Image (cartoon, helix red, strand yellow):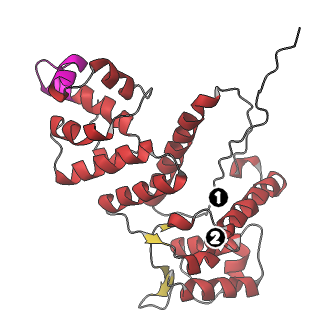
Amino acid sequence: MVVKSIFDYTDYREWLRDAFENFKKRKTVVSWRYMGMKLKADPGNLLRISQGKIHLSVKMIKPMAIFFELNEKETAFWTELVYFGRAKTDKEALDHYEKMQVLKGVPLKRLESNELEFYRCWYYNAIRSVIGISKFKNNYKALAEACTPPITEKEAKESVALLKSLKMIKKNSEGFWIVSDSFVSTGGNWRSDAVKNFQKDTILLAHDSLTNHPPSLRDISTVTMTFNMDDIGLLREKIKEFRTDLLRLSQEGTNDSAVFQLNVQLFPLAILKNTEEKK
């Protein structure tokens, strides 16, 4: 098994499983019982944690870091990784995810409330991303036509002006516009009306993509499933893990030539109250 760095993980339980298997190869006698004895923990609970059935207790974070011989930076990342997995709200998860990115060395910019204008129109985000992967000086017509659906040249100019005012882009020594930060987060303001409207707009764009783009350029599928309401937290964690994995791939990619929008939508179609017939 290829041993991955802890910094490559977004699910602390996945890391725990892999770290345990790797630990067994380096030590003569290692088992969940042995680990439980060293940590003064129930070995059955340790196994259930690794299986994703229960969460690791906060008080066990440091002892487990010591058990796996993590260094200071790895321990800091491990701590954020656990809190990220235990997060009960998106704000809480985002805060810990951002700290994980900083520990990994990913440049990060958190939007302040006055900067949330960035999310007022869907194409502001698209324009910033296009500038990040292309050489752009003043050809606003080409910039506008790169968007799908196309925007007007005036809208492209307004977008660049806004991004400049928010210090999200700047000119390099050759006069080309470049992005100032490689990652943008809405931080604690993510629930604002501006972000909600942005999400609504991108959902509508996904709807239009069904007719505007060929299947080879999109992946829009639907599936209807049933779950126990107690499993919703686990489903959200799986979706969060999927998103962060794709975000990491995007950040690590080279020679990018297109900007994609990913919308993951999970919502109830029906919730059972009491469907038993009265006799």
Give the dominant element type of the magenta stretch: helix, strand or loop.
helix
Q: Does the magenta stretch include residue 88?
A: no
Q: Is residue 160 left or right of residue 55?
A: right
| Residue bearing the label numbered 2 | 126
Whole-percent x and y of residue 198? 69, 66
Which badge, 1 or 2, comes first in the chain's sequence?
A: 2
Q: Above or below — where is 89 with respect to 15?
A: below
Q: Does the magenta stretch include residue 29?
A: yes
What is the crowding at mark 2: few (fewer than 14 residues within 10 Å), some, or many (at least 20)?
many
Residue 43 falls in image quadrant: top left
Residue 257 falls in image quadrant: bottom right
Q: In this view, does 217 lie to the left or right of 63?
A: right
Q: Are marks 1 and 2 in contact (CB under 8 Å)?
A: yes
What is the crowding at mark 1: few (fewer than 14 residues within 10 Å), some, or many (at least 20)?
few
| Residue bearing the label numbered 1 | 261
Whole-percent x and y of residue 222? 74, 38
Of the pair 118 and 85, the residue shown nearer to us: 85
Q: What element carries label 1?
A: loop
Instruction: Give the residue drawn at x 43%, y 29%.
Output: 52
Q: Give the range drawn in magenta.
A: 23-37
Q: What residue type is labelled 1?
A: Gln
Whole-percent x and y of residue 22? 23, 29
Q: Above or below — where is 24 with respect to 12?
A: above
Q: Above or below — where is 148 with respect to 4?
A: below
Q: Distance between the residues labelled 1 and 2?
A: 9 Å
Of the pair 179 and 88, the residue shown nearer to us: 88
Whole-percent x and y of residue 115? 57, 79
Q: In this view, does 181 lie to the left or right of 74?
A: right
Q: Would you say residue 184 is visible in this rendering?
A: yes
Of the pair 230 and 200, the residue shown nearer to us: 230
Tell me the number on the disc at residue 228: none
